[in-house]
Image: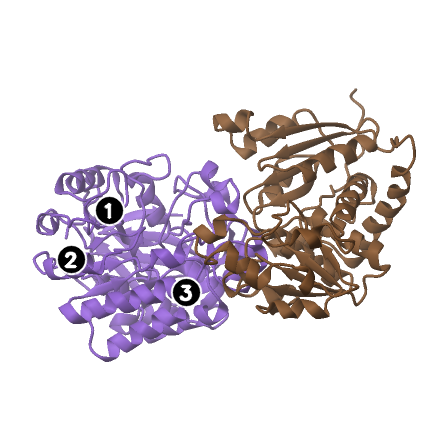
Chain colours: A brown, B purple
Amino acid sequence: MGELLPPSPPRRHLLSVGDLEREDVERILATARSLAGSLGRELKKLPTLRGRTVVNVFYESSTRTLSSFELAAKRLSADTMSIRASGSSVDKGESLKDTILTLSAYDPDVIVIRHPSIGAPRLVARWTDAHVVNAGDGKNQHPTQALLDVYAMQEAFGRLEGLHVAIVGDVLHSRVARSLVQALGLVGARATVVAPPTLLPPGIDALGCETSTDISAISAADVVYVLRMQRERMEEAYVPSLREYTALYGITPERVRPGQAVMHPGPMNRGVEIDPRVADSDAALVIDQVRAGLAVRMAVLYDVLTVAPVAPVARGVAEAVA
Amino acid sequence: MTFACRNGRGDFLVLEGRVVAPAQRIDESLRITVTDGVISSLEPAPAGTLVVAPAFVDPHVHLRTPGREDEETLRSGAEAAAAGGFCAIVAMPNTDPVVDCAPVLGDLLARASTEAVVPMAFMAAISKGQRGEELTEMAELAAAGAAAFTDDGRPVVSAALLRRALRYCALAERPLALHCEEPTLSRGGHVHEGPVSGEIGLGGYPSLAESLMVERDLALAALEGRHVHLMHLSARESVAALDRALAIGVTATAEVTPHHLVLTDDAVRSLDTNVKMNPPLRAEEDRQALLDGLRRGAIQAVATDHAPHARHEKDVPFEEAPFGVTGLETAFAALHTRLVRPGVLSLETLLERMSGGPARMLGLPEPRIEVGARANLVALDLEREWEVSEGGFRSLSANSWLLGQRLRGRVVRTVADGRLVYEE
C-alpha cells in the first residue's frame, strides 16, 4: 500500500469493426486458430486469464453469444458472471450508467455488453475502467460475430482474399450485416448485400459493398450468408408477407450452387429465410460458426487483455471526436 | 403581444466601438450614450476594438417552464440570453402544462416580470394540449399577449385543423409558426436518412418528412392568404419549396438554427447525444442551401431552438436521448467562428439575421441604433478566444454541441430594454 503504481496503459476495447485495421483482424484470427487447437484436447482449460474477471451484461436475450462468451472466459480460467436485464435492477429502472458503475466497483477486467441501443458499449467504455467488448448494440455492430464468421470462412475456404460473400435478407435492421461487410472489406473479401428494396438501407454501399434486390445475385458468390427474417417486419409493412419473402429470397436447394457455402448467424427460421434442406446440408456451416465463436471470443478476450496498447478503439474515438 | 421582464429604470451608459447596424446602413466608429435607457447621442469616436450592434432577438427558445424547472427557468433562460447578446427571446409553449390557455400564459408573463432580466414573449399552442384536435382560444390568448401560435415540438398533422387555424387566427392577428414534420415518414428516425444512418444503423429521418409538410403548409397558407412562419428548416428541398411559394406571393418567413448552418450528419458518427436534434443534421448540400437561403433573405432569421435537457437524460445511448441542444450562449460565437471568419457569411448579414430579421419576421419591436430609441445593444469582441465548457453556462443545462470547442468572438456587454443586463 502507498506504493506508486505505474501509470496504466490505455485500455483496449472491441466496440466496432470500424475501429479495427487489417492487422488487428489477422492477429485475432491467428490467436483464435492457435486457441482452437486446445479445444480438441481432453483437458480443455488454459490458465491464460487466471485471476481475471469477465462480466457479461446482456440487455437483450441471447443464447449463443452469451453462452459462447461465458464458456470462452471459463476455458481461459477467468472468473465470469453474467447479468441479464430481466430479473436485475434494470427491471427496477436502474440506468445503464448506474448498472455499469455498480459492476465496475468489483474491478472487472472485461465487461462484455449487449444492448438494444446503438452506441451503448461506447458509453460503457467511458464509464468503466474495464476493457469493453461489444456483444451487439442495436442495429449497429456485432464485431465478434463478424470475426467468427470471417474465421469460419477462412477455415472452410483456406483463404479470405478475393472471397465473394452474398449477404441476403433484412440488412436494414441487421448489425450482423453491417459488421460483416466492414470485416470482409478489411480482409480483402468482396461483399454483395441482397434484400428487398424496403430492407436495403439507403447509403449502405458507403460501407464498401455492392447491393442488389435480385436473389440471382447470390449465384456468383462463394458464400451465401443468410440473415434472420423477423415476423415484426411484416407487421411494420417492410414486406407484405413472409410467404412472399420466402418465395423471393428464401434460400432453397435450387438457389444454392454446388461448391457454395451457406452461413447463418442464428437463430434460424427454418422454412422462412432458409429451407430446412439447405440448413441440414453439407453446404451449411452453421455449426462451424458456433464452434468458431468459442475460439474467436477466447481470442478477443485474450487480445483486449494482453496485446500491447495500440488501442484500436483509441483510433476510432479520436476520429469520431475530431 | 406582450414582452415581460423585471422592471427597472433605464441605465446611463456609454458604449464605444465600430457600430454596425446593417438595417440602418451604419458602419462607423461611434460613441453611443444611453440616458435613462434611451439612446441620447451618437457621436464620432476613435476606432476601438469592439463592435457594437443592435442586440439579438431569438424567435425560438425553450425555457422548460412550467414543468421542468430543473432544466431551465425564466430566470436562468433570461440570464443565458443576456450572456448571448439577446435583448428579446420568444419561448415555445410545449411545456407541462402546455401554454394553451390565457391563465397559463398570464402566469408566465407575471413570473417573467419578476424573474427575467431580458424581455421575453411566449408563443401559445395552436391546439389544446398540442394534441392536434381542437383549437386553442386564440383570440383570448392574443389579447393576453401571445406572440404567435405554434405546436412546436410536433407538427399539426391534420391538414384540416391547420386550415381552420389559419382562418381563425385572423381574429388573433398573429402568425402561425410551424414545425414541419410528416410523422409517418419520420417515425423511428433519429438522424438524417442517408449514408451515415445506413452505415451506423440508426433509424433514418428523411428530408422528405420535412419538405413534404413544408409544401403542404405553404399550400394551405396560399389558400387562406395567411402568414406562416416555418421553424428550424433543415432540408434543401424545404428551402426550394419556400422559394417557390415566395415567388408566387405567399406570405411566408423562415428560420434556421446555428447547428444546421454549421454541422452535417457526419457529426453523428460520434454518437454524441449533443448532436441529436429534431429536425436532424443533414447533408452538406442541405447546409449549403440553408446558408444560401439565409444570405438571400428567403430565411430571415437565425433561431437557436435553445433546448435545455438534464444531464442524466442526455447521458444515455443515442436512441434513448431526447432531441435538442442549447444555443443561447454560443450562437453568435459559433457562427462568427465557423461562418464569418472563414468568409462564408458576412458579419453584416449575420448581425441582421440575428436581430432585425427575426424581429420584423414576427412583428416584434426591432432593435435600432438611433437617437431616441430604447437601447438594445450588444458589444462584441471579435478577436477574443474562449473555450465552451460545461461549467461556463448560465443556462441550467449544458447540452451544447460545442462543448470543448474553442470559439473566436465573444459577447462582452448586452443592453436590453435600456438596461445593462450582461457585462463580462
**Residue drawn at 37 percent across, 67 percent down:** B350
Q: Secondary structure at mark 1?
A: loop
Residue B131 pos. (x, y %):
24, 46
Spot occupied by residue A206 in the image (x, y as percentages of width and height):
61, 66
User: Which residue bears the numbered disc 3?
Assistant: B207
Marks 1,2: beta carbons within 8 A: no
Q: Amino acid at mark 3?
A: Ser
Residue holding disc 1:
B131
**Where does residue B333 sit, x and y in percent of width and height?**
44, 58
For the point 81% across and 24% down, the residue is A3
Q: Chain of mark 2?
A: B
Whether callout 1 and callout 2 share a subunit is answered: yes
Which of the chains bears the disc numbered 1? B
Q: What's the CA distance linking mark 3 and mark 1?
A: 24 Å
| Amino acid type of the residue that numbered disc 1 sits on in the rendered structure | Arg
- Secondary element at tag 3: helix
Mark 2 nearby-residue class (10 Å; few <14, some 14–19, many ≥20): many
Chain ID for label 3?
B
Quadrant of the rendering where the C terminus of chain A is positioned: bottom right
Residue A254: name its quadrant.
bottom right
Placement of the N terminus of chain A among the 4 image quadrants? top right
Give x and y (percent) for residue B11. Answer: 23, 48
Tell me the residue at 39%/44% (across/down): B308
User: Do callouts 2 and 3 mark residues in contact (Cβ within 8 Å)?
Assistant: no
Q: Are marks 3 and 1 on the same chain?
A: yes
